[in-house]
């Protein structure tokens, strides 16, 4: 309020006093003074006083004490004064609900006023007063206003329904306002239609399944008609609503597109972007060979380019969206590279976004221009921008092979500038270029080595070390260079330490004679003197590899590295699809799904692009959790604090924004070690080389768990024989259909769906892995967390060939029940970690308890009787199984298929009593009595067990088996 | 939707605060001040998110406008709305300044109540707003019932930008074709990028509800007219013969009064104009642009403490035309200690505060050439980083449209009133200005 007092001085000028004087009342006792003025008889004085109150309110002062006095001023025919009082009411009504009631009468009266402006004002304000008691009084006036003869009142009332719904959703439904609102979609006035659409869309968002908007070809037609006539804002509401519609077929889709395209010429950028959203979404349904499809693609480019001549803030929004569009449909803007050239005076946020898009659009055709620009940018002032420009040069080299040589020489020029951050950034990208084009540009290594001293950032140091290690045989003084880094080993960041360790091992394998001492030194630094488990583990692995089988070590450490892909920073496809459905919105600016930044239920539902004609089914596959207890939607476990995660994780997390599809090479190396390398070692040698097993046993305590797959093989096999050797059992147990456990969105493109089955005594986890990312996935491994019944994989996950993009593979993983046990909540919860070359992913799923019902679970009659009596009655649980149309024999047969055995049957007064037993893998017995009345589809089930917590889950199995 | 709208002065003090949604608390006002206005580093995005709340901001002189939300709103719409809010305020009290905002705070609250309902933007055309949001509040009581319904039907109607019953004794209209020509040129004279962004601004003083049709030398229209139903090839050959009569428009956008569906199907621009001044259309062209000036730079580093700069500008248009307000801006390094300038024409000055030599020429005819040379003395520094050499930029104004756009007609029909197209007095003017007109050196 400093400025308020400064203005006091102006007051003396007197004659030409303006409203700013109201900001000046900050004296003591002003509330008292204001009170007197508010109650003055003079209208002018009253109004002045209310203005002062509002000014105080604006600067955050509490003037709620004046509530009754201000409300008293409400009864006025002065519209300006009335509006001020309403403004006050909206602010303070919530804190003074009882007094707010005083205002109700005036509102109700105003809603009947002959002047439509006053009627609308009353209903608009009333909706903003969030007091329950007032909302009750609001219903009648609102009902009238929704049917008012004046469109201005109706359009205001339409929004008011959304306000009321926000306060009391139930009330809106009970009063039937939603139907009235739906009727307004057919209103003759376009603005009423637009506001009704906005209100309905908002309400529908909080009821994801209500089908409230009920879009059908008729309503769509009405919306498209209103689209031509309403205000720019109304057009946005309508287009955003249209984007949620799923056209029935490609023809409908095309006709909507045709009617939306004229919007691309609107002066309002938001209208344009919303139209682009509708088109991007619906064109997905059009057959690609259609002429119209090509026409539409051509029409999209010019308006997108025009957005770049808007004000910088809008340019930013547009660029973030173009970034998505370019990833989804690169063909649209492929010829427009020049418009993304950075202007010297662009704000930094525009510059950075333009740079991103330039790299995406770079191709052989335009690379010369792009490189010239990038070189220019690399000399600019802003550090972030310069770094990004340097990195971009490297990315061009990787993307366009023909340009690689020019890029490298440009980078060398930049290194010559000796500007510290430019040099470091250049070295990081040169490392990637070496990865992509091995044995081509090594001549520059000498220049790189000159700059060793100026590298102070971990990423650059690590990159340099990687280069030295990788090309150790060509660098004469490689050992000296690495040794110099080794001096301050403990002060380096983990990234550098890991890299140094690997580089020296590489060096040793290449020049074993001279570097024995060095390798000893680094191994002991890494294993004995380090607290970092990742480093220690890697150190031990190398150590053992080198000491037992140098040939194998060479194969592992110097293995051929997988190629790095051309595109970087790609958004994972399922997320990209979702973001395309959110073009123009905040989600598209943040490049995050709304659920990542919106609280509560709003906007959390995932939007999908409609499927192209003829492939309608594929879109359904991502639906989760239809029914049945075993199919509860999977929860993704947060990765922190998970033992398993830490172990598998190592240094997988990429150090920068560079996204998994291009792993900086050193990470690759590391993964090869634990993934491909070690797995195959273990898989192949487990029987043959006991020395290795023993060696591993000595490794730090965490190791055996990491390699838990190994012991499980033995144990699992044993179990198999045990069970397999048992009784020949019917194999007809019920297997639930597969559900999605791990959506691709949460796993960087890997989608996992699955189910559990028990076949002939063998427990199997049937998985379907789908690669929805752009790059190949390899090195799969699976691990379970400890769980209630000790389920553990009985063998490695057999994904032998790499999973290429869009490929799906079915895998059956045998499970044993000899794993570590920990009680889970719920009891049948299983937490799973799946690793591939990209990352480690976690999810949890629930298995039907029948999975662990063993085949020899038929109890002796006598034992049954005794046990039944023995278990205290408190442990008995009763359930109703409804709607089963089976006779007792059929039911009994069905249950037997799932290892629920009927021991005896009794018929009393037309009621069949079945006595049944179940044995769990851990030896727990469950006894049950099922009562079936002929003609009654509802069965009564009593379950007794010493561990009563399983009863619920046994019941669920009954239900599942009987109903399927 | 928009949850709240705040206006701050340069110190971060709140001038206006209007909250529309319950999920936005008073602390949001402070959050923006602390994290953006008072942020230690320059904020690097116009959209920011803290504490799960998103803030959109724009700045006008030293006033901050911020829109706040917790939902996944249409971001483009929020910015468009903020700009619109600025337009509306400017229309009511001209300049957006702290003083004007304080002087009109009641009005601003009234406007915010009207044009944003529960965070949804409503009709924000100043023409319509001014009919019922006035600072003579009492006036509203004097509206007759007819007037009232006229207001409401205008605010909600299909032609929300124009009211009925406008009368002028003299029907007159002014068309301004305003173009800004943008250029980025390499030191060797290669055009790296060039485009014209143009605007057609119309001032209409026409009675009744006139139906207008605007025509220009749009290549697509001319080609279509030239050969009604023939193939593309013959259209092109015809154009080749007739020289540069039509221009290729890359893209255009229109004021909301223009019937877009008609433009889409027939490429005709028809509309009922708002009263007074407004922007009819914007367009962009990239082909066959007339670049009014060519800048030829020559920078030579003489040792570590001296730079020699020579810049030649050449005008490239009809000798009979005159360019005005020519200004060439030659950036100088930060460690400049002294500058000597010699120029053939106009005045040149070294402005230390702007790190540039500014060379001004009042007028220059077409097909002429002028030159400036300067010696820049530098203080020796041990700053390793080389001078970034910002581009040489240029400003000017020319009396033609660098895109080649020509207005062919603007027809006015008003069937209800007895004036015809011939009675309307029409004025057309072309002004070409420099946009970002830069040459790297």
Image (cartoon, coloured by chain):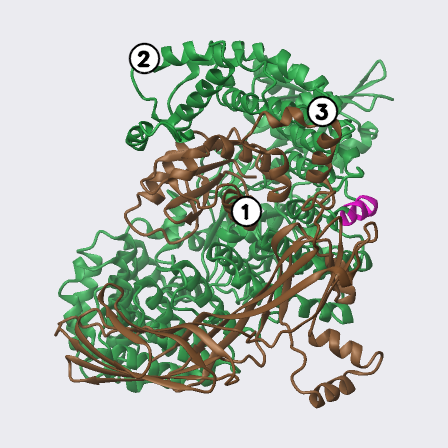
Distance between mark 3 and mark 2 Cα atoms: 48 Å
Alpha-carbon neighbours of circle 1 within 10 Å: few (<14), some, or many (≥20)?
some
Distance between mark 1 and mark 3 Cα atoms: 35 Å
Q: Return the x and y of residue A41 as percentages of the image width and height.
A: 50, 9
Alpha-carbon neighbours of circle 3 within 10 Å: few (<14), some, or many (≥20)?
few
Q: Residue at x 44, y 67 (%)?
A: A355
Pointer 2 chain: A
Q: Is residue A469 magenta?
A: no
Mark 3 on the same chain as mark 2 = yes
Residue A314 appears left or right of A393: right
Q: Which residues are magenta?
A: A216-225
Pointer 1 chain: B
Is residue A899 placed above or below A714 in the rendered structure?
above
Is residue A554 placed above or below A236 in the rendered structure?
below
Q: Is residue A224 magenta?
A: yes
Residue sitting nearer the eye, A70 or A137? A70
> Which secondary structure type mostly characterizes the magenta part of the structure?
helix
Residue labelled with disc 3? A173
Mark 1 on the same chain as mark 3 = no
Which quadrant is home to the C terminus of chain B?
bottom left
Q: Return the x and y of residue B45 as percentages of the image width and height.
A: 41, 53
Residue sitting nearer the eye, B192 or A752? B192
Residue labelled with disc 1? B84
Q: Colour of chain A?
A: green
Dot label at residue B353: none
Q: Which chain is brown?
A: B
Q: Nearer the viewer, mark 1 or mark 3?
A: 1
Residue labelled with disc 2? A29
Q: Return the x and y of residue A962 as percentages of the image width and height.
A: 75, 33
Q: Residue at x 76, y 24 (%)?
A: A176
Q: Nearer the viewer, mark 3 or mark 2?
A: 2
Mark 2 or mark 3, which is nearer the start of the sequence? Answer: 2
């Amino acid at each position: 309020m400093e400025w308020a007092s400064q203005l006091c001085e102006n007051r003396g000028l007197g004659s030409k006093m303006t409203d700013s004087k109201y900001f000046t009342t900050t004296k003591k006792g002003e509330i008292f003074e204001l009170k007197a003025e508010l109650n003055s008889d003079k209208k002018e004085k009253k109004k002045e006083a209310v203005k002062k109150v509002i000014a105080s309110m604006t600067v955050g002062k509490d003037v709620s004490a004046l509530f009754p006095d201000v409300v008293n001023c409400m009864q006025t025919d002065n519209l300006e004064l009335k509006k001020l009082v309403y403004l006050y009411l909206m602010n303070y009504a919530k804190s003074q609900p009882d007094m707010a009631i005083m205002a109700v009468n005036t509102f109700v009266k105003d809603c009947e006023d002959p002047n439509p402006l006053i009627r609308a004002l009353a209903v608009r304000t009333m909706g903003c007063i969030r007091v329950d008691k007032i909302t009750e009084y609001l219903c009648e006036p609102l009902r009238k206003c929704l049917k008012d003869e004046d469109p201005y009142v109706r359009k205001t009332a339409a929004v008011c329904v959304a306000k009321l719904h926000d306060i009391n959703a139930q009330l809106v439904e009970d009063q039937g306002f939603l139907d009235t609102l739906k009727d307004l979609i057919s209103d003759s006035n376009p603005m009423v239609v637009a506001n009704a659409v906005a209100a309905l869309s908002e309400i529908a968002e909080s009821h994801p399944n209500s089908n409230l908007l009920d879009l059908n070809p008729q309503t769509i037609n009405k919306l498209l008609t209103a689209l031509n006539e309403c205000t720019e804002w109304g057009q946005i509401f309508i287009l955003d609503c249209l984007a949620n519609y799923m056209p029935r077929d490609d023809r409908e889709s095309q006709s909507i597109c045709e009617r939306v395209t004229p919007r691309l010429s609107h002066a309002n950028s938001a209208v344009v972007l919303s139209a682009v959203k509708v088109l991007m979404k619906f064109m997905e349904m059009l057959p690609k060979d259609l002429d119209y499809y090509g026409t539409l693609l051509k029409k999209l480019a010019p308006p997108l380019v025009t957005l770049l001549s808007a004000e910088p803030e809008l340019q930013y929004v547009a660029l973030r969206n173009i970034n998505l569009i370019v990833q989804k449909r690169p063909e649209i803007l492929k010829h427009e590279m020049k418009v993304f050239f950075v202007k010297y005076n662009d704000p930094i946020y525009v510059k950075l976004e333009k740079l991103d898009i330039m790299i995406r659009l770079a191709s052989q055709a335009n690379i010369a221009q792009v490189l010239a620009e990038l070189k220019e940018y690399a000399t600019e002032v802003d550090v972030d921008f310069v770094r990004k420009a340097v990195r971009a040069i490297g990315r061009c080299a990787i993307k366009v092979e023909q340009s690689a040589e020019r890029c490298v020489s440009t980078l060398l020029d930049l290194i010559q500038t000796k500007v510290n951050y430019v040099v470091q950034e250049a070295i990081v990208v040169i490392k990637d270029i070496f990865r992509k084009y091995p044995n081509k540009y090594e001549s520059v290594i000498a220049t790189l080595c000159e700059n060793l001293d100026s590298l102070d950032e971990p990423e650059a140091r690590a990159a340099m070390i990687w280069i030295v290690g990788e090309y150790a045989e060509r660098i004469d003084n490689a050992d000296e260079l690495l040794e110099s880094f080794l001096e301050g080993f403990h002060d380096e960041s983990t990234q550098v330490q890991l890299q140094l360790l690997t580089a020296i091992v590489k060096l040793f394998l290449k020049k074993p004679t001279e570097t024995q001492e060095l390798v000893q030194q680094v191994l002991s630094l890494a294993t004995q003197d380090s607290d970092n488990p990742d480093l220690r583990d890697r150190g031990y692995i190398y150590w053992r590899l080198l000491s037992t089988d140098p040939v194998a070590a060479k194969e592992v450490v110097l293995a051929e590295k997988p190629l790095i892909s051309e595109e970087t920073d790609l958004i994972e496809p399922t997320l990209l699809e979702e973001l395309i459905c959110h073009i123009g919105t905040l989600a598209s600016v943040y490049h995050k799904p709304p659920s990542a930044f919106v609280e509560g239920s709003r906007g959390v539902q995932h939007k999908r692009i409609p499927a192209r004609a003829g492939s309608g089914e594929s879109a359904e596959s991502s639906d989760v959790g239809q029914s049945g207890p075993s199919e509860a939607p999977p929860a993704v476990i947060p990765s922190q604090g998970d033992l398993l995660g830490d172990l598998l994780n190592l240094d997988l997390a990429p150090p920068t924004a560079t996204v998994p599809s291009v792993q900086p090479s050193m990470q690759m190396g590391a993964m090869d070690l634990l993934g491909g390398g070690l797995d195959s070692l273990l898989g192949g040698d487990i029987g043959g080389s006991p020395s290795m097993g023993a060696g591993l046993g000595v490794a730090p305590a965490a190791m055996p768990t990491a390699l838990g797959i190994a012991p499980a093989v033995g144990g699992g096999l044993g179990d198999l024989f045990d069970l397999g050797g048992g009784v020949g059992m019917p194999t007809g147990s019920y297997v639930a259909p597969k559900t999605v456990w791990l959506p691709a969105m949460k796993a960087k493109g890997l989608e996992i769906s699955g189910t559990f089955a028990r076949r002939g005594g063998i427990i199997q986890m049937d998985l379907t892995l789908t690669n929805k990312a752009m790059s190949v996935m390899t090195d799969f491994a699976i691990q379970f967390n400890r769980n209630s019944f000790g389920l553990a994989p009985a063998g490695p996950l057999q994904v032998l060939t790499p999973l290429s993009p869009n490929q799906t593979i079915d895998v059956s993983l045998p499970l044993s029940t000899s794993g570590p046990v920990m009680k889970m909540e719920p009891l049948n919860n299983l937490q799973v970690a799946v690793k591939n070359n990209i990352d480690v992913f976690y999810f949890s799923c629930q298995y039907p308890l029948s999975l662990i019902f063993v085949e020899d679970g038929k109890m002796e009659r006598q034992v049954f009787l005794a046990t039944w009596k023995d278990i205290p009655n408190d442990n008995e649980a009763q359930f109703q199984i409804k709607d089963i149309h089976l006779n007792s024999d059929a039911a009994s047969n069905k249950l037997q298929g799932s290892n629920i055995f009927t021991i005896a049957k009794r018929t009393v007064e037309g009621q069949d009593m079945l006595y049944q037993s179940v044995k769990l893998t851990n030896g727990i017995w469950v006894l049950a009595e099922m009562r079936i009345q002929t003609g009654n589809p509802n069965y009564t089930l009593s379950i007794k067990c010493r561990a009563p917590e399983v009863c619920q889950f046994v019941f669920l199995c009954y239900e599942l088996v009987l109903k399927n | 939707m928009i949850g709240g709208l705040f206006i701050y002065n340069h110190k971060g003090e709140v001038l206006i605060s209007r909250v529309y949604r319950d999920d936005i608390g008073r602390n949001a006002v402070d959050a923006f001040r602390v994290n953006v206005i008072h942020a230690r580093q320059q904020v690097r995005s116009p959209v920011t998110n803290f504490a799960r709340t998103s803030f959109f901001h724009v700045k006008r002189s030293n006033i901050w406008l911020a829109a706040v939300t917790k939902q996944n709103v249409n971001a483009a719409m929020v910015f468009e709305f903020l700009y619109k809010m600025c337009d509306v305020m400017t229309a009511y009290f001209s300049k957006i300044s702290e003083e004007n905002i304080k002087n009109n705070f009641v009005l601003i609250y009234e406007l915010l109540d009207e044009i944003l309902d529960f965070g949804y933007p409503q009709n924000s055309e100043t023409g319509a707003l001014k009919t019922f949001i006035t600072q003579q509040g009492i006036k509203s009581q004097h509206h007759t019932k007819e007037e009232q319904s006229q207001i409401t039907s205008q605010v909600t109607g299909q032609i929300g930008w124009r009211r009925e019953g406008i009368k002028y004794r003299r029907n007159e209209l002014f068309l301004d074709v305003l173009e800004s020509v943008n250029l980025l040129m390499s030191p060797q004279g290669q055009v790296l990028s060039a485009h014209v962004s143009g605007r057609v601004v119309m001032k209409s003083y026409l009675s009744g509800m006139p139906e207008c049709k605007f025509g220009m030398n749009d290549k697509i229209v001319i080609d279509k007219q030239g050969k009604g139903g023939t193939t593309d090839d013959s259209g092109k050959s015809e154009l080749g013969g007739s020289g540069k009569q039509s221009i290729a428009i890359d893209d255009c956008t229109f004021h909301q009064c223009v019937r877009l569906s008609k433009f889409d199907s027939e490429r005709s621009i028809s509309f009922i104009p708002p009263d007074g001044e407004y922007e009819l259309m914007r367009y962009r062209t990239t082909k066959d642009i007339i670049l009014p000036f060519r800048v030829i730079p020559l920078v030579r580093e003489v040792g570590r403490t001296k730079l020699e700069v020579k810049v030649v500008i050449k005008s490239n248009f009809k000798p009979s035309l005159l360019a005005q307000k020519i200004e060439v801006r030659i950036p100088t390094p930060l460690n400049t200690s002294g500058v000597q300038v010699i120029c053939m024409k106009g005045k040149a000055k070294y402005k230390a505060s702007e790190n540039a030599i500014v060379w001004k020429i009042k007028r220059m005819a077409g097909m002429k050439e002028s030159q400036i040379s300067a010696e820049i003395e530098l203080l020796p520094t041990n700053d390793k980083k080389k001078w970034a050499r910002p581009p040489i930029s240029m400003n000017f104004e020319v009396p033609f449209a660098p895109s080649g756009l020509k207005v062919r007609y603007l027809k006015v029909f008003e069937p209800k009133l007895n004036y015809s197209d011939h009675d309307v007095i029409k004025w057309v003017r072309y002004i070409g200005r420099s946009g970002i007109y830069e040459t790297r050196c």
